[in-house]
Image (cartoon, rainbow, N blue to C red):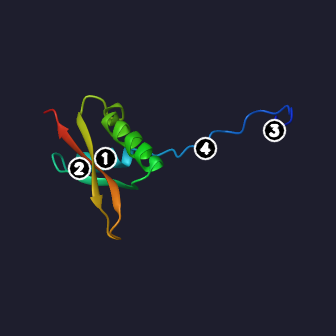
Amino acid sequence: MSIGILSWEDPAPRATTKIDYAPIAASLRDRPDQWAVVAENPLTTEGRRETSRMVNAIKRCGAIAPGTGTYKAVTRTVTGNDGEKVLRVYATYTSNS
């Protein structure tokens, strides 16, 4: 078993994919009560993780424009254009007024 070396350095920055959800939230507000496909991810472990992150972020989109309505997001496993199974994220906005 290799133990490695002792090296003094700061950790490398985390590799993140920062998504700006404001444009998605704005598009959903423009068409209230209509569902939209907002993402499609491969049916893999990483695809499932990304899908889960996106669903949670969309549900929190109210933080972008507080008090304006409710965002909902769901996932479905579907057959993509290439015949492979994929995870789709669907989202909608409902006005509280």
Q: Mark 3 vs mark 4: give the one in front.
A: 3
Q: Is residue 81 above or below residue 51?
A: below
* Amino acid at pointer 2: Asp
On the image, numbered disc 1 is attached to which residue?
26
Of the two numbered discs 3 and 4 on the same chain, state the one appearing first in sequence.
3
- The quadrant in which residue 14 appears is top right
| Residue 5 spot, x, y in % from top left | 86, 36
The location of residue 53, given as percent across then percent down, is: 41, 40
| Front tag of 2 and 3 | 3
Q: Quadrant of the C terminus?
A: top left
Q: Residue at x 36, y 35 (%)?
A: 64
SS of the residue at dot 3? loop
Q: Amino acid at mark 1?
A: Ala
Q: Residue at x 35, y 31 (%)?
A: 63
**How far is mark 4 from mark 1, CA to CA?**
27 Å
- Tell me the tag on residue 2: 3
Q: What residue did someone put label 4 on?
A: 15
Q: Are marks 2 and 1 in contact (CB under 8 Å)?
A: yes
